Image (spheres, helix red, strand yellow):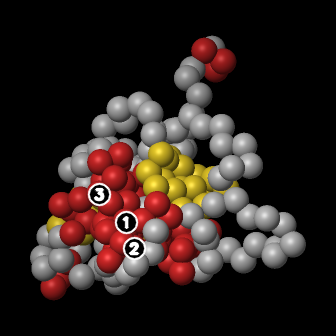
């Protein structure tokens, strides 16, 4: 009978650290959550695990880095962005890829799995370029996951492209892939 049960899946959910500024009126993570999984009282933000879809969009919305997400948090993204490749090996451009996206990038891109394309902040895209990446991309999932990650990622990529253009740089260095 045990073999007829559906497989158990671990679904990581974000937690909110003491760095949260909810007591100061910040509600950016709450307004960014597409699933109404976050709420606040006077002092803290709480996660409703029943509504949470583990998209991680709240991670990018938090300016205090108070939203911690196992395996996909701000520190994990930063580690990928500051990765120092071997200078003897030609490096492929960095590609933040939704974990649900189907892709075969071969050696053309260096994929970094993320929970959702919408969780990549513009600062991570720009930091990758500042760290020496020639190009950086975001790949959203091709299915309608209900997170709205593609639209969020598209806005952030467009913002980065406008900044690069204003700075006299090639805006095509930041791309969204479909």
Nearest to N terminus: mark 1 or mark 3: 3
What residue is shown at x 81% (from left), y 76% (from top)? 87
* 101 horizontally vs 176: left or right: right
Corner quadrant of residue 63: bottom left
Question: How many neighbours does mark 1 have within 10 angstroms: few (below 14), some (14-19), or many (20 or more)?
Answer: many
Quadrant of the drawing holding the C terminus: top left
Q: Which residue is mark 3?
A: 155
Q: Element type at marker 1?
A: helix
Question: How many neighbours does mark 2 have within 10 angstroms: few (below 14), some (14-19), or many (20 or more)?
Answer: some
Corner quadrant of residue 144: top left
Q: CA distance from mark 2 to mark 3?
A: 14 Å
Q: Element type at marker 3?
A: helix
Nearest to N terminus: mark 2 or mark 3: 3
Nearer to us of marks 2 and 3 is 2
What residue is shown at x 45% (from left), y 75% (from top)? 169
Q: Which residue is mark 1?
A: 161
* 128 horizontally vs 108: left or right: left
Residue 69 in sight here: no
* Disc 2 and disc 3 in contact, CB within 8 angstroms: no
Residue 93's label in the rendered image is none
Looking at the picture, tell me which residue is in the foreground, 20 or 117. 117
Residue 164's label in the rendered image is 2
Q: CA distance from mark 1 to mark 3?
A: 10 Å
Residue 170 at x, y = what percent? Answer: 46, 68
* Disc 2 and disc 1 in contact, CB within 8 angstroms: yes
């Amino acid at each position: 009978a045990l073999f007829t049960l559906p497989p158990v899946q671990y679904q990581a959910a974000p937690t909110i650290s003491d760095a949260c500024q909810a007591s100061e009126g910040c509600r950016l993570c709450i307004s960014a959550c597409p699933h109404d999984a976050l709420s606040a009282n006077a002092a803290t933000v709480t996660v409703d695990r029943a509504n949470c879809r583990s998209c991680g969009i709240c991670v990018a919305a938090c300016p205090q880095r108070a939203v911690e997400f196992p395996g996909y948090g701000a520190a994990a993204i930063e580690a990928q962005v500051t990765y120092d490749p071997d200078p003897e090996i030609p490096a492929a451009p960095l590609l933040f890829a939704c974990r649900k996206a189907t892709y075969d990038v071969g050696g053309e891109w260096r994929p970094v799995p993320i929970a959702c394309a919408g969780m990549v902040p513009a600062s991570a895209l720009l930091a990758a370029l500042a760290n020496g990446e020639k190009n950086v991309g975001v790949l959203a999932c091709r299915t309608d996951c209900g997170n709205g990650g593609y639209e969020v990622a598209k806005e952030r990529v467009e913002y980065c492209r406008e900044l690069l253009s204003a700075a006299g740089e090639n805006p095509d260095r930041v791309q969204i892939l479909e």
